Amino acid sequence: MSVTAPTVNLHGCDRLYRALTQCHRQIPAGPSRDAACRHLNRSFAECLVAVACPEESDAVRTLCSSGGTALKRRQCQQAQLSLSACLSSHQMDL
């Protein structure tokens, strides 16, 4: 019985994915690669999160962008919990 890796639909993140994999191919593993590819890694991760959970991601981006009032901080925390729950719903049991 063979097991195939799950496929990922990149929905617009494919350009970032290609750039990140190219960065990993060009730079040997280690601290220099980590530093050089950091911004691509972060951008790709943010893109995937926005694709998987667009409404929750947008709420976190909007509500958690600055300190604000106690109400805004609570709303930010709730948005983060909603995003976490959404992302959890997309995880696969392997």
Image (spheres, grey):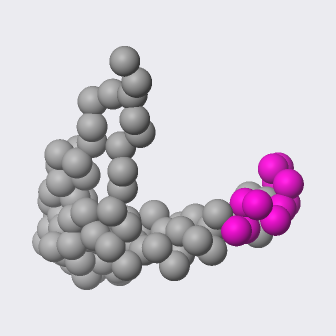
The residue sitting at the top extreme is 1
Relative height, residue 41 to residue 69 (above, below)? above
The residue stretch that appears in magenta: 22-32
Quadrant the N terminus occupies? top left
Residue 39 falls in image quadrant: bottom right
In the picture, measured across the screen, residue 14 lies left or right of residue 9, that is: right
Residue 58 at what x, y percent from top left? 23, 77
Q: Residue furthest front?
A: 1
| Residue toward you, 35 or 23 | 23
Q: Is residue 45 magenta?
A: no
Q: Is residue 10 above or below residue 94?
A: below
Q: Which quadrant of the structure image shows residue 18?
A: bottom right
- The location of residue 85, given as percent across then percent down, is 18, 49
Up-down relation of residue 40 to residue 2 (above or below): below
In terms of depth relative to the viewer, which is nearer, 59 or 20?
Answer: 20
**Quadrant in the picture for residue 9:** bottom left
Q: Nearer the viewer, residue 72 or 28?
A: 28
Q: Is residue 23 magenta?
A: yes
Image coords of residue 8 (percent x, y): 36, 56
19 left or right, relative to 16: right
| Residue 54: x %, y % from top left | 21, 72
Q: Is residue 63 visible?
A: no
Q: How many marks?
A: 0
Identify the residue at image location x=17%, y=46%.
89
